[in-house]
Image: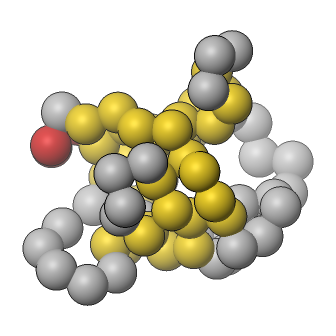
Amino acid sequence: MKVTIRRSTETGLSIYVPKKDLEEPIVEAEHETLWGGWIKIANGWVLDLPHMASDTQLPITISARKRGGEG
């Protein structure tokens, strides 16, 4: 699914899923740099992110894969 990750002043990093009209803060990440691992968002979803350079500029729209259940 396509998602947009951005840096927010009030929540740190957040993710927006346009298809679901959902915006949630990122609460946990497998890697400090985000890329190439999983992230957990506030609603409980766990998403796998693609490998990218650690200095990738935000905001960015990428393809992510939801673990378990529907996407």
Residue at left offset 43%, top offset 48%: 42
Tell me the quadrant of the picture where the C terminus can be found.
bottom left
Tell me residue 49's x, y (percent): 54, 68
Q: Report the residue that reaches farthest toward the top.
A: 9
Colour theme: secondary structure
Q: Is residue 47 left or right of residue 27?
A: left
Q: Which residue, as the protein is rendered here, is positioned at the far bottom?
A: 68
Residue shown at 25%/36% (left/top)? Answer: 22
Q: Is residue 22 left or right of residue 38?
A: left
What x and y, as percent, mark residue 54?
85, 57
Q: Residue at x 56, y 64 (%)?
A: 39
Q: Answer whether residue 30 is visible to the viewer in this image.
A: yes
Residue drawn at (15%, 43%) of the image? 19
User: In the rendered view, does 62 fall on the left or right side of 3?
Assistant: right
Compared to residue 30, the image places residue 7 above or below, namely above
Where, by quadrant of the figure, is residue 4 drawn?
top left
Across and down, in percent, residue 40 comes to 51, 62
